[in-house]
DNA sequence: AACGTATCCGCAAACGTTACCGATACTTTT
DNA sequence: AAAAGTATCGGTAACGTTTGCGGATACGTT
């Protein structure tokens, strides 16, 4: 017979349905609903979880309030040096580690900048990360890096995760698939600072950090022309990327300036990947009327072409001039050296980081798509120097 | 004249000290203490801060309690499909983004794995990151990367930050300065999963992911010996790094096996940096009795030596055999190609990630410094193939 | 009718911090 | 000695979620 846990009467108990698979009872006398606690100790939960010492533990041990502890730990005024010392000692003794999560929640800021990059294959993005990392750490910010892996879906998921984690600002370089930008406009709506770099787009009002791709491409092609090449092909990237468009424009502008007709069969708007590069390269080199020079959108593609040329017995630079873009480390070592455009990668990282910090500090309005354009440098090596 | 905000009497007000630099008053009549609120509207705080829609907003709009909303959003049972739909619709309409911080706080887990790497200069760590990233994302974890920049102080600061941010586990590769390990033992104490990789140490009880450095070094040196080199130098790394020690041991073991005396003036225990490599290289090549081969601790050093040899007119591989370690991209392209040891970088990343996930899931006890040893591969190129 | 059951939903206590607003117990002026 | 000022400290709402426990209703069964 069951007794009522409240009024202690027996015989007034009736069943009253189930709650989460447990029989539920009600006492007719006092109208108290209850279930029978399971025989195991009722409320252990995960006692196994190690208790992290909190500010409250310190407060209790020292015999002050937690607000006092908080102030002591943060070196605020309004506190007796002795109590402060006592608190600090106790904190050390109890091995206290502040809980950043709680801190972030109450301050609703995280001191963390997010960064989304499309890939890690080339030196480019790791270098940008190095630059940004340096500036951010100096200013007491953390950097959380995510990788979209050239996938639009992943990029969107990443931005969502960044949003959920309440980063204070986002640095992003788009994937080559990205054609829609709602996921970025969200940041603008919420007033979360956003800076695009390298792979930027026009459809979002945010600062952009880029290099002078147009000029760089122009100079690269001009360099080829001045070295006697006539029929110059361009192996370009996907045109939804501004960088690809600019490099393409620079190529066309240079050709036009020097009165070289652009043969459209020599202009490829392709995707960025080693495999694709091989396909495009094969196409170009197998062409009936093969170009005598190729300006590639990046060094990987350029090197792929040089290797392929070697296989086919086409001599670089005499029969084929090659210019790349980015100055990968291997470009200096391949024989002949690859002429390429060096980008100030570290500086790109630093600039984006500085800019987003400024936006955070100044609570600056979203600048209307202002651009900061960094300078590149043409590195001339053997691959474009034809022996007359 | 000031009136009492409580009893509304006038003339009973006296000053009563300062509170945070604001004049404080007390009403003698009702004994009520108060300060004069600043003339600006009293309690706006940062009304400027945009309000993020919370679960409570949804609850109010739909007309249910916030617990119901929470359950609806997480697809729990015990909820009417119609209510759930209404809640989901409202969430979409209000553009609700969950606050991961609050979630993390209450769950005291973050679904984030931290990773600390010493540098980004070589391909090695970016590749490891790629591997780990892939595995972790598949399992719904985030990856936060920090860079210690080969500085012990930064490494310690990084671990503290990781701890404060309550990451669920840490993957770390030590700096070349790291000689003390309290900052890692903290993780063990707190029961936070920790996996070391590549740059590991013996002084902490945690799983380690490494490659067979000893064997690899042995095989590299053996390869040199079998190609007719006699007086082989070793340009090694700092000996507090296990990798350096193992490679050094492998070198000595191979020399011993083939009865080559190890001349200590040909064995360098140096630091890892391009500049240092140049100094060591110069030392070795300027030696009165120059070695006829060099096994370097990494490719950067090996390449530095090859370039220096070229400058000095020493022919590689005929007068000097060179073997590196890591197979950097440029090693394949330099002429002659650099013989080197390829490490399964991506696989290292994947293995560490899988391991830490397993530790989290199984709440596995800290394994007593178990090691997982991945296989390397000797890539033979021109730099070690002497023309007889 | 009287009782039992299933379904849905709400209450309120955490999670660990911060910061506003007070409140004491002194010390210094007037 | 009263009034004013100072130096320290405490109480307690937030911050946005999750979740155990239990209340309430509607319906089904003797």
Image: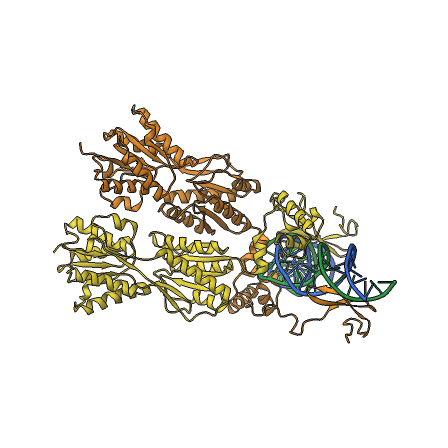
Chain colours: A orange, B yellow, C green, D blue
x 50%, y 48%: residue: A158
Percent of width and height locating residue B120: 36, 52
Task: Name the outermost residue toward the top.
Answer: A259
Q: Out of A192 and A159, give the one closest to the viewer.
A: A159
- Can residue B310 be seen in the rendering of this structure? yes
Percent of width and height locating residue B121: 34, 51
Q: Out of A126 and A262, give the one closest to the viewer.
A: A262
Percent of width and height locating residue A151: 45, 45
Percent of width and height locating residue A181: 51, 39
- Can residue B57 be seen in the rendering of this structure? no
Image height check: is A32 above or below A168? below
Q: How many marks?
A: 0
Q: Give the left or right position of residue B8, taking residue B205 as reference.
A: right
**The C terminus of chain B lies in quadrant:** bottom left
Q: Give the left or right position of residue B59, taking residue A120 as reference.
A: right
Image height check: is B183 above or below A132? below
Image-quadrant location for residue A78:
bottom right
Task: Name the outermost residue toward the left.
Answer: B388
Q: Out of A262 and A388, give the one closest to the viewer.
A: A262
Q: Out of B250 and A236, give the one closest to the viewer.
A: A236
x 29%, y 25%: residue: A260
């Amino acid at each position: 017979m069951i007794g009522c846990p409240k009024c202690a009467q027996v015989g007034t108990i009736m069943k009253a349905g189930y709650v989460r698979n447990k029989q539920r009872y009600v006492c007719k006398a006092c109208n108290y609903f209850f279930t029978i606690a399971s025989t195991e100790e009722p409320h252990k939960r995960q006692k196994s979880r190690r208790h992290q010492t909190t500010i409250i533990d310190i407060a209790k041990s020292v015999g002050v309030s937690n607000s006092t502890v908080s102030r002591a730990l943060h070196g605020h005024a309004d506190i007796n040096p002795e109590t402060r010392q006592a608190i600090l000692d106790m904190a050390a003794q109890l091995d206290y580690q502040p809980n950043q999560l709680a801190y972030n929640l109450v301050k609703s800021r995280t001191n963390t900048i997010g960064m989304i990059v499309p890939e890690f294959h080339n030196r480019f993005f790791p270098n940008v990360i190095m630059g940004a990392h340096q500036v951010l750490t100096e200013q007491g910010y953390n950097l959380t890096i995510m990788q979209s892996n050239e996938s639009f879906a992943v990029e969107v998921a990443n931005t969502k995760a960044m949003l959920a984690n309440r980063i204070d600002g986002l640095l992003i370089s788009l994937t080559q698939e990205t054609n829609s930008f709602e996921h970025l406009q969200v940041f603008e709506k919420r007033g979360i600072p956003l800076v695009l770099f390298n792979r930027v787009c026009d459809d979002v009002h945010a600062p952009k950090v880029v290099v002078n791709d147009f000029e760089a491409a122009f100079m690269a092609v001009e360099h080829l022309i001045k070295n006697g090449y006539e029929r110059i092909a361009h192996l370009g990237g996907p045109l939804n990327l501004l960088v690809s468009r600019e490099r393409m424009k620079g190529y066309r502008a240079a050709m036009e300036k020097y009165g070289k007709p652009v043969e459209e069969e020599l202009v490829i708007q392709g995707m960025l990947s080693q495999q694709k590069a091989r396909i495009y390269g094969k196409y170009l080199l197998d062409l009936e009327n093969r170009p005598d020079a190729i300006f590639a959108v990046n060094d990987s593609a350029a090197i792929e072409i040089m290797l392929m040329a070697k296989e086919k017995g086409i001599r670089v630079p005499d029969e084929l001039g090659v210019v790349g873009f980015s100055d990968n480390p291997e470009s200096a070592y391949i024989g002949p050296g690859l002429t390429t455009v060096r980008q100030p990668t570290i500086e790109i990282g630093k600039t984006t980081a500085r800019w987003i910090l400024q936006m955070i500090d100044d609570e600056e309005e979203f600048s209307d798509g202002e651009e900061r354009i960094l300078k590149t440098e043409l590195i001339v090596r053997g691959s474009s120097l034809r022996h007359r």
